[in-house]
Image (spheres, rainbow, N blue to C red):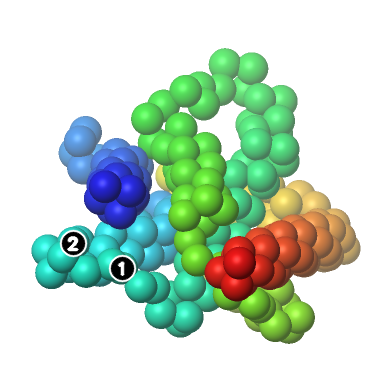
Amino acid sequence: MKQKIITISRFILALLITLGLLERLGIFNGEIDLTMFVYYTNLSNVLVLIVSGYTAYKMLQAIIKNENFSMSSRLEKLRIATTVIIVITGLVYHFVLYPQYRSEDPYYNWFTFYNIISHYVAPIAMFVDWLFFDQKIKLNVSDPIKWLSIPIIYIGYALIYGLVGPIIPKIGTSYVYFFFDIDKKGITGVFSWVVILLIFFLVLNYLIYFLNNSLAKRQQSSKKV
């Protein structure tokens, strides 16, 4: 029964993210906006959609065969990396971007289906899913540094897009986030933001690393009893 409930919950998460992304893409109002794929939020949600959906699919296969689902170590590592990536999405939005948006527009509407799903439901659901339902494996001390490569690649992508990409209609600039805006912040200002964000990401990565290894040790101990 527990395996079935977890499977259903992962399918539901994948469905909610799909609907949120389709809303942001403009499918429901007929105004397609492909620049949504410049945003870290949307890319990280696509990753959660794929990983959560794939995990649910593999679990469903096990249920149909009347077998206990056993997650591969590769999938376990992918899921924890995905958890870190989407948690970054939620934290940066809530503590950095949301205050900025409100300061620019006091009537900024954050209470939309897409916004709630992509910035709150997806990060919280993925973290809770990983924390309580995933089998924990011992991670290498270098893994948090490897996870940092994803934000670094994205930062490079976002800065290049800001310099040479077309203007994003919804915000009137090609710089997807205010802390990447070289025209307003200058190179020094952007560099400072990048350093601050990367330090924050690395600290978060290692917090989850220590939490994971502590839980992995506890799970291993409980198996021996």
Answer whether residue 111 is visible to the viewer in this image.
Answer: yes
The residue most toward the front is: 225
User: Which one is nearer the viewer's eye here, 23 or 56?
Assistant: 56
Mark 2 element type: helix
User: Which one is nearer the viewer's eye here, 193 or 10?
Assistant: 10
Q: How far from the left and from the top, in percent, is residue 29?
A: 21, 33
**Amino acid tagged 2:** Ile
Residue 211 vertical placement versus 105 (above, below):
below
**Amino acid tagged 1:** Phe
Disc number at residue 63?
A: 2
| Residue under the point 65% across and 69% down | 221
Disc number at residue 69?
A: 1
Mark 1 element type: loop
* Marks 1 and 2 in Cβ contact (< 8 Å): yes
As drawn, is 55 to the left or to the right of 36?
Answer: left
| Residue under the point 37% across and 30% down | 113
The residue most toward the top is: 107
Q: Quadrant of residue 99?
A: top right
Residue 167 vertical placement versus 110 (above, below):
below
Q: How far from the left and from the top, in percent, is residue 26?
A: 27, 41
| Residue under the point 66% across and 44% down | 91
Q: Classify 10 Å Cα crowding around label 1: few (below 14), some (14-19), many (20 and above).
A: some
Distance from Cα at disc 1 to Cα at disc 2: 8 Å
| Residue under the point 76% across and 81% down | 141
Q: Quadrant of residue 163?
A: bottom right
Q: Quadrant of residue 220?
A: bottom right
